[in-house]
Image (cartoon, coloured by chain):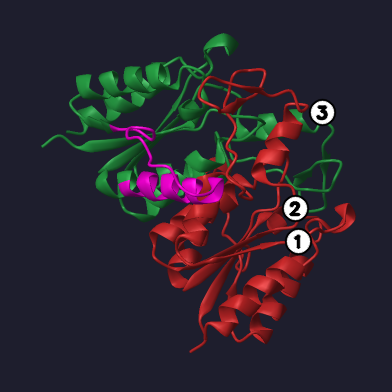
Chain colours: A red, B green
Amino acid sequence: MPLKLYLAGPEVFLPDARAVLDAKAAMTRAYGFEPICPGDIAIEPAPTRHEFGLKISAVDEGFMNAADGVIANLTPFRGIAADPGTVFELGYMCASGKLVAAYTNVTDSHFARTRAWYGGELTVDENGRQRGPDGHALEDFEMIENLMLHGGVTRRGGHIAIHAATPDRLYHDLTAFEECLKVLAARG
Amino acid sequence: MPLKLYLAGPEVFLPDARAVLDAKAAMTRAYGFEPICPGDIAIEPAPTRHEFGLKISAVDEGFMNAADGVIANLTPFRGIAADPGTVFELGYMCASGKLVAAYTNVTDSHFARTRAWYGGELTVDENGRQRGPDGHALEDFEMIENLMLHGGVTRRGGHIAIHAATPDRLYHDLTAFEECLKVLAARG
């Protein structure tokens, strides 16, 4: 039985979501795994938008429960941070004791992106912590995301892949995704 | 033995982090629970920033493992979404089968915030999905955050509190936090 990998990421929001997810699924199979993607099954209608959202949540959690591991696409989405749905799923899979891997198609660290968000205007407080003009402290731990995410993966022996995709291929470039597959496959 | 609640949120980044966390902890005790906050213990130094970040990750995961539940502050932080560390922790606690509750001090829904992020310039595709100028689809499920978060809490019977804090009290107003405590306390 091949190990099942849940392919978490913001691809579900793309105009060509199905094509990108199909490409990721095919690549996953090529490395000997069985892919499970959000959006893999049609969700039945519900009386309200809210209830429809709850149904999708139930289906995607079921997918995660059925999976042996996750590869999370943490490429920043609508801002400087990863898609919150993907982040939730990474936390969920870390707690579930599953195989975890993550990647980003942006090479700027969490710190570099946050500094840029503040326009570079940082100050250093009396404890040596860097802060933005609003007084909020920045994490500076040489990580791709908030330390709970990067740390949660690394501390479990999971791989973090970082790749510089061109802006027009930010959500389509599968180089870093494939690197995660390679590392997982090499572990047998 | 009082139930232990992990108090997840972006408060750790505030200039007055300790004071805000102390206020949340005192309120938590007043409702009969034992609070556990990120930042509750000093982390020992590490050879590199990266390793220091890993240590914090380990300590905070340990806090979550020791807790019986979580109250997650999902108030948008540095953009239109919740703090990624908090989101990871909410997913972690949902998977762990712990008590979950969440709140936000912003009344605009996930959809309203995302629409505003696009400057209101949405189009509707052939399937009825609303999309931004970049073609990316918006979730419109009458939820405070991505459906995995709001759905993950609601489907577990967890409470979601929504409160309109004034901008200057966005990370200090504890009205919605207290509402979560009240609901959890009423359940005995």
Disc ID at residue A107 = 2
Give the residue at mark 3: B119
The furthest residue to the left: B1
In primary-sequence order, the first of circles 2 and 1 is 2
Q: Are marks 2 and 1 in contact (CB under 8 Å)?
A: yes
Q: Amino acid at mark 2?
A: Thr
Cα separation between marks 1 and 3: 30 Å
Q: Amino acid at mark 3?
A: Gly
Count the numbered circles shown.
3
Disc ID at residue B28 = none
Q: Tell me where residue A53 appears, x and y as whole percent.
A: 55, 47
Query: Could one spot residue A80 in this view of the protein?
Result: no
Query: Could one spot residue B38 in this view of the protein?
Result: yes
Q: For numbered disc 2, what is the local secondary structure?
A: loop
Q: Chain of mark 2?
A: A
Magenta residues, start to end: B36-62
Which quadrant is home to the N terminus of chain B?
Answer: top left
In front of the other: label 3 or label 2?
2
Q: Amino acid at mark 1?
A: His
**Residue B133 against residue B185 in the figure, above or below:** below
Q: Is B41 positioned to the left or the right of A115 in the image?
A: left
**Residue B7 against residue B25 in the figure, above or below:** below
Disc 3: CA contacts within 10 A as few (<14), some (14-19) or many (>=20): few
Give the residue at mark 1: A163
Q: For numbered disc 3, what is the local secondary structure?
A: loop
Cα separation between marks 2 and 1: 6 Å
**Residue at figure coordinates x 38%, y 55% from the top left:** B95
In front of the other: label 1 or label 3?
1
Q: Tell me where residue A116 appears, x and y as whole percent.
A: 76, 33
Cα separation between marks 3 and 2: 27 Å
